[in-house]
Image (cartoon, helix red, strand yellow):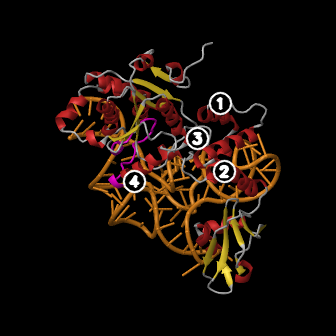
Amino acid sequence: MTAERADSAAWLSRNAVDCLPRGGLEAKLGLARPLRVKLGIDPTAADIHLGFTVVLQKLREFQDAGHTVVLIIGDGTARVGDPSGRSATRPMLSEQEIMRNAATFQDQALKVLDRERLEVRFNGDWLDMPMADLLRLLATTTVAHLIERDDFAKRLAAGTPVAMLELLYPLLQGYDSVAIRADVELGGTDQRFNLLLGRDIQRAYGQEEQVIMTMPLLTGTDGVRKMSKSLGNYIGVSEPPDEIYGKTLSIPDASLQSWFALLLGQEPPAGLGPRDAKRALARALVGRFCGPEQAQDAERRFDLIHVRGGLPEDVPTVAYEAAGSAVALPALLGRVFGVSTSQARRLIAQGGVKLDGATLPADALELSAEALDGHVLSLGKRRFARLLII
RNA sequence: GGCGGGAUUCCCGAGCGGUCAAAGGGGACUGACUGUAAAUCAGUUGGCACUGCCUUCGGAGGUUCGAAUCCUCCUCCCGCCA
C-alpha cells in the first residue's frame, strides 16, 4: 500500500461514482496549473440541502489541493429548468426569485467552500446570446442523442409532456463549460448525461474536453428518494439547529451507513446502536453548520421535549383577544397555531391538545380566560405557545 | 390539418345523473407503543356560527327537481395519421 497524496487523482476520485474518461483526471492534474473546476447550480430553491453538500465537499478538496472552483449561478438556465430526474416540467421562476435565491445560495455555499479559490459567475451573462450563436450551439447535438436520456425516455414512454425548453437545458449548461473553459465538472450522478454532453459541446467549440466526476446522491429523510427540496425530504444547511438535529434523528436506520459515508466520510461508529449512531450523526451535522456549541444544546432541547415529553425553555408568548370570559378553543388554536378551526376541533377530539402538559378532554370546546391566561398550550408534540389573554 | 383519448380534493388515482366532501394508495397530522420526529399499530385529512350549512372535481355557459358525472364553446395535455 502506498500512501495516497491528498492532491492525487486517486484520492480526489476515491468516493466518486464516475470519473471519466479513465485517466482523464491524472492528465489534467499533470498540467501543473490550477485547474478550473466547475459546478453549476440552479437557483430554483433558496436553500442548499445536505445532499448538495456532498458535491460541495468534493469541490472543497479540489480547492485545498490548490485548484479554482468556478461556481456558476444558473440565472439563465433557471429560466429553463433542469429536467434531470423530473417526471414533470418545472415551473418557471421570476427574475426576482432567481436573483434572491442566487444571493442566499452563495452565502450558504460558503459554509463549505473556501472563499479564496472561488470564482462566481452568472450564466445569464453569456446565455443571452444572439440568434446566430444559439443556432451554432443547437447544431452541436441531435435530438436522438438528447432523448436517449433516461428521464426523457421515461416521460415520452409514459406520455407525459416534455417541453422544448427542457430539451434545450443540457445544451445551455454544456455551453457554460465552454464559456468558463472548464477542466473538470462535478455533479450528482443524476447529472451524468449533462456533464458528458458538456464534453461534446466543448469539443465542438474546439476546446479541450473537461473531465467529469459524479458524486453519489444522498437519500432524503424518507430514506427512499433522493434528497430534494421539491420532495420535501431535505435538511437545509441554514435551518435552525433543532431542525437539523430532529430531522437527522428521523431518518430510517437503513440510511445510517450512507449518511455517515457521504456526509462525514466515515463508517458509523462501531458498537453504537442505531439510535446513538444517529445522535452522533446529528451532533456532527449541527456542529458543522451551526457551530459546535449548538450541537450539545440542540441535543439537550430534543431530549427535553421528545424523550421526556417536557416543555421547551423558550415558549413564545402569543397574545389573544378574548371576546368574553369563555374562550372558544377551536378559534383560539386556529389563531395561535395557524390551523383551521375544523382541524383544531379534530385535534382536540384526538387528544392532541395539552394545557401545561395535561391533555384536554376530547369534548373541550371552550375554557375560561383565567384558565388559559399565562398557561402553555401545546398542539401535538412540537408546537407550543404561552397564552396572554387580553 | 384530420381522428381519437384526457384534465378529479396536497400528489397519484377511482367515480360516469341522486346513496359524493367524492373509493384506494402516497404524503401529512394526531394518538398508542418505543430506541428518536425510526419501525409498527390505530385514527384524522375542504371550510364554517358543525346533529346543520357553505365552497370544491381545468374555465365559461346550458339541460335537469338534481351534474364530478349529460350538452355547447374555450384553455391545456397525450396518442395515431398527415
Return the residue found at the far top.
A1
**Quarter in which the N terminus of chain A is drawn:** top right
Residue at mark 4 to residue at mark 3: CA–CA distance? 25 Å
**Which numbered disc, 4 or 3, marks the residue closer to the eye?**
4
Disc 4/disc 2 C-alpha distance (Å): 30 Å
Instruction: Let me know if marks 3 and 1 both belong to one chain.
Output: yes
Where is residue A248 shown, x and y percent of the image?
Answer: 65, 45
Query: In this picture, is A164 found above or below A7?
Result: below
> Please, what is the three-letter code of the amino acid marked with disc 1?
Gln
Asked if badges 4 and 3 are on one and the same chain, I answer yes
Q: Which residue is mark 4?
A: A100
- Between disc 3 and disc 1, the foreground one is 1
Chain of the residue under the numbered disc 2 shown in the image: A
Query: In this rendering, which labeled residue sits more in front, label 1 or label 4?
Result: 1
Which mark, by number, is residue A266? 1
Image mark for residue A220: 3
- Of all chains, the one bearing label 3 is A
Please name the amino acid that badge 2 sits on: Glu
Q: Position of residue A224 (x, y in %)?
A: 60, 37
Query: What range is drawn magenta here?
Result: A77-96
Chain under numbered label 1: A
Q: Main secondary structure of the magenta part?
A: loop
The three-letter code of the residue at mark 4 reads Arg
Between disc 2 and disc 1, the foreground one is 2
What residue is shown at x 18% (from left), y 37% (from top)? A131
- According to the picture, the residue beneath numbered tag 2 turns out to be A293
